[in-house]
Image (cartoon, grey):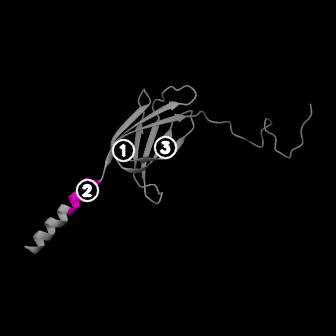
């Protein structure tokens, strides 16, 4: 009888502890920074982040619709790493705190910046002799 009572107590505590974990519904909107137009078919990757800042294993890979939106229900409260990849735009990444039942995240992607090269004539090296025409 004592074992049965102990088992019921453990079961009750497990149910009570799991009932306290909170979950959120999130909406992510992705648009172009320059024009404000929605980004269709962008990959949105979500990973939980531990209290030590390490990315948890697993994760979700979502796609944006024609309005640049994607949604997911049941994200646990805490830190969430959001990464967005879209063709022709800079990759985006940020850790977001999820602490409310409904969370909307707006992401504005930039056009890739020109890369600097020491071999490019447009950008001479700082100590290189200047060519005169």
Q: Position of residue 42 (x, y in %)?
A: 47, 35
Q: CA distance from mark 1 to mark 3?
A: 20 Å
Q: Main secondary structure of the magenta part?
A: helix
Q: Earlier in the sequence, mark 2 or mark 1?
A: 2
Note whether 20 is above or below 89 in the view shown: below
Q: Secondary structure at mark 2?
A: helix
Q: Earlier in the sequence, mark 2 or mark 3?
A: 2
Note whether 29 is above or below 53 in the view shown: above
If the image is split into quadrants, where does the N terminus sit? bottom left
Residue at the spot of label 3:
83
**In front of the other: label 2 or label 3?**
2
Badges 1 and 3: C-beta atoms under 8 Å apart?
Answer: no
User: Who's the residue at 19% across and 66% down the image?
Assistant: 10
18 in the magenta segment: yes
Q: Position of residue 96 (x, y in %)?
A: 46, 46
Q: Secondary structure at mark 1?
A: loop
**In front of the other: label 2 or label 1?**
1
User: Who's the residue at 90% across and 36% down the image?
Assistant: 131
If the image is split into quadrants, where does the C terminus sit? top right
In-image side of 87 versus 116 (left or right): left
Residue at the spot of label 1:
100
Badges 2 and 3: C-beta atoms under 8 Å apart?
Answer: no
2 in the magenta segment: no
Camera-side residue of 120 and 36: 36
Q: Earlier in the sequence, mark 1 or mark 3?
A: 3
Q: Residues within 10 Å of mark 2 (few under 14, many from 20)?
A: few
Q: Residues within 10 Å of mark 3 (few under 14, many from 20)?
A: some
Camera-side residue of 35 and 131: 35
Q: CA distance from mark 2 to mark 3?
A: 28 Å
Note whether 35 is above or below 79 in the view shown: above
Residue at the spot of label 2:
18
Q: Which residues are magenta?
A: 13-20
């Amino acid at each position: 009888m004592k074992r049965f009572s102990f088992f019921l107590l453990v079961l009750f505590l497990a149910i009570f502890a799991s009932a306290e974990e909170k979950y959120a519904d999130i909406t992510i909107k992705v648009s172009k920074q320059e024009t404000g137009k929605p980004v269709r078919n962008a990959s949105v990757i979500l990973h939980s982040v531990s209290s030590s800042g390490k990315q948890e294993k697993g994760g979700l890979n979502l796609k944006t619709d024609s309005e640049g939106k994607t949604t997911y229900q049941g994200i646990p409260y805490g830190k969430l790493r959001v990464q967005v990849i879209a063709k022709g735009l800079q990759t985006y990444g940020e850790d977001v705190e999820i602490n409310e039942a409904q969370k909307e995240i707006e992401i504005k992607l930039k056009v890739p910046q020109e890369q600097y090269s020491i071999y490019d004539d447009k950008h001479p090296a700082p100590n290189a002799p200047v060519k005169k025409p």
